[in-house]
Image (cartoon, rainbow, N blue to C red):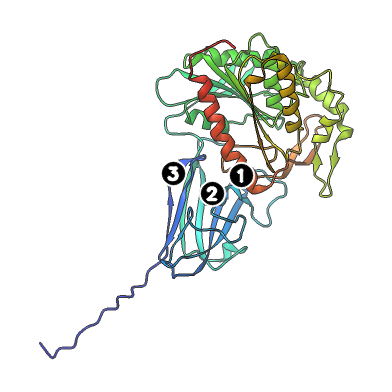
Amino acid sequence: MGNAPVMSVSTQKRTCPLLSVQPIRGLVDEKFQFVVTNLPPDQKVTLHSLHQSDDKDFWEAFGHYVSDEHGSVTGFKHESLGGTYEGTEPMGLLWSMRPIPGSRHGLRLRKRDIVRPMEVCISVYSGHLSQGFSQQTPLATSVTERWYVAPGVKRVNIREKEIRGTLFLPPGSGPYPGVLDLWGAGGGLVEYRSALLASHGFASMALEYLAPEDLRLEDTDASYFEKAYQILKNHPMVKKDHLAVVGLCLGSAITLSMVSYSKVIKPQCCVCISGSHLMPVDKSLSEFFEEMKNHADKLCVNENNQVIHKNLFLSLPCQSAKVDVGRIKCPLLLVNGDDDQILPAVESAEDMAMMMEKSGNRHLLEILTYPDAGHLIEPPYSPHFRATNFKLECTKERIVMLWGGQTKPHAYAQEDAWKKILAFLWQHLSAPVTSF
């Protein structure tokens, strides 16, 4: 036995790189963390994300990393040195997404089927790659699900009178504070922000108001929004005196007009994202768009043939037509990007502040202005779109609309604004009701 050969076993086992993404399943406004281990020290790798949208287009983002002395790359600790984003930005794999090469032009990523998650495939590749990912074999891959609806959120179709919308109810027995959610001039029933608001405890009703089904624009006026508000207010799962209105773009203009003039819409607070008081919605939407059409010659295009919509509003003879925001009697939060190319939102906010100062209600106004952010301030980690395809409601023309903004500061604006919007809503909707 003593002379028997000794079998030696190598301690240098072949190990495969491992990729961990946590959480595997979470809300879209929840951060994830990725960690790559079992790499050689100082190895160049590329982290790549891939998502197929509900429109069947593929979107991607990628960052270039170098593993540390332990053979690891950690999203919240290590910097991306290049790619679609740079710096210590683990969520850059989402907010810097763009259509893959060869895609249709002018795309915008929006969740249409909110009862299904946004699935994102995250892979790690050897070397610093910028293209040809589908031709390469990844070292490791993980899939994470991003949800707009938390477990237990209920989706209720609203088809009452001529009103068309979707009410999202949080888990539990309720009743809950309510939010009327108004999107912009792109039209359609846009549900994902309301779904996310319900995931944070608000009964939120996404309202379709641009010619839903048989309703004509000529018949969509203040009464349409008042009926929708009453439906929300009278729902048994909604606290009647704990209501808010949230609007973006045209939805903000409607919000300002309704809260200033309506005898029915009396919320405890409202949030206006990228809006203006220069476009009062005091008649039917048909008349509103006819007025816009009369000034369509003021629209101009840049060197990329992208339409700059902001000029139209700056040219309006609007001094007498502004919404009288001095009449507002509830807390108002304005959320703006200073590179908004659709509306003069920042200039409007400054003028609104002066009007409210003169009227004695300036204390109700809070303004958030984000440098280098554009018009489409959406929920956190949504990709930034500087320009996308769009159909102008006033002329029915299909164009490429310039929204504005730079990717990284716009991403910061979306993350920061969302936290502050939720805090603002909770502050004013969970407190005892007072009269302003």
Going by the numbered disc 1, the residue's amino acid type is Ala
Q: Position of residue 433 (x, y in %)?
A: 51, 12
Q: CA distance from mark 3 to mark 2?
A: 15 Å
Q: 306 above or below 171?
A: below
Whether residue 220 is visible here, answered yes or no, is no
**In percent of the image, x 70 and y 40: which residue is there?**
374
Mark 2, residue position: 91
Q: Position of residue 390 (x, y in %)?
A: 74, 38
* Of marks 3 and 2, the one in the foreground: 2
Residue 411 is labelled as 1
Packing grade of label 2 (10 A; few <14, some 14-19, many >=20) is many
> At numbered mark 1, what does the secondary structure look like: helix, strand or loop?
helix
Going by the numbered disc 2, the residue's amino acid type is Met
Packing grade of label 3 (10 A; few <14, some 14-19, many >=20) is some
Is 434 positioned to the left or the right of 396 in the image? left
Name the image quarter holding residue 39.
bottom left
Mark 3, residue position: 25
Q: Position of residue 26 (x, y in %)?
A: 45, 41
Going by the numbered disc 3, the residue's amino acid type is Arg
Q: CA distance from mark 2 to mark 1?
A: 9 Å
Is 140 positioned to the left or the right of 159 in the image? left
